[in-house]
Amino acid sequence: MIEFFGQILSWFSSLFDHSLIELIGEYGSYFYIITFVWTFLEGETFVIFAGYAAHQGLLDYWVLVAAAWSGSFAGDQLWFYLGRRYGQRILARFPKMQGGVETALFLARKYNTVFILSFRFIYGIRNVSSFALGMSGLSWPRYLVLNFIAAGIWANSFAGAGYLFGELSEAVLGDMAKRFGLAMLVVFLVVAWLAVRMHKRQKAKAEAEGAAK
């Protein structure tokens, strides 16, 4: 069984490791730009992958964190502006956002600063929280400062998770870490993504059944 698992990992590694490592090695500077754009939109999994690449020496960890930090910060500042300026019109155009916005507003009123610092880690409302905060009446300067701090916490957490994965894979696999590490990370991220998708579908189904009763 162990030998079979090793063969599967080796095959998976051959698909991803060398080509991706060579790609990052050759175009590493562009990955910082990609990181900024990706995190401007939303990119936890990409930052984890990039953190692992930083552990392998293919990217500079602190430049990576700076790119993820600034991208996440800029993206949420934009959503805050949209919520402040066009909140009700956007909700009227996209009513499915209403539930997430209401939840985010409730948590913002109840937990205030703690919520602003942590909403990036809350599954289900992360995408609408900055938009909701823009509608809440929160002042621009206060949100700007807290969002800057929160983006830094988020960037360090996910880049650090990828870097830590590299450390752990070396501790467990030793010299084989570079051969199998990226493949294992890709498998882990794919499984995590599938789990999230399944949870979303089950939640949507439960909500639909509840509305039908």
Image (cartoon, rainbow, N blue to C red):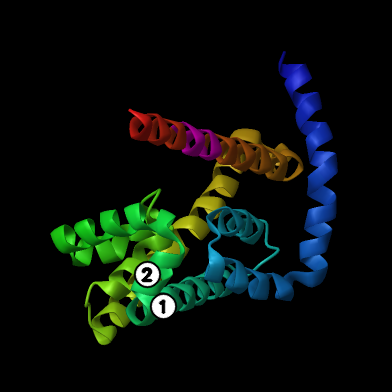
Please name the predominant secondary structure of the magenta segment in the image.
helix
Q: Which residue is mark 1?
A: 82
- Crowd class of label 2 (few under 14; some 14 to 19; many from 20; radius 10 Å): many
Q: What element does badge 2 sit on?
A: helix
Query: Residue sitting at 60 percent across and 66 percent down?
Result: 38
Numbered mark located on residue 131 in the image: 2
Q: In the rendered view, does 130 fall on the left or right side of 57?
A: left
Q: Are marks 1 and 2 in contact (CB under 8 Å)?
A: yes
Q: What element does badge 1 sit on?
A: helix
Depth check: give the residue in front, 106 or 46: 106
- State the image quarter where residue 51 is shown: bottom right
Amino acid type, callout 1: Leu
Q: Is residue 59 above or below residue 208?
A: below
Highlighted range, magenta: 196-202
Q: Is residue 152 magenta?
A: no
Q: In the rendered view, does 195 fall on the left or right side of 129?
A: right
Query: Residue sitting at 38 percent across and 36 percent down?
Result: 207
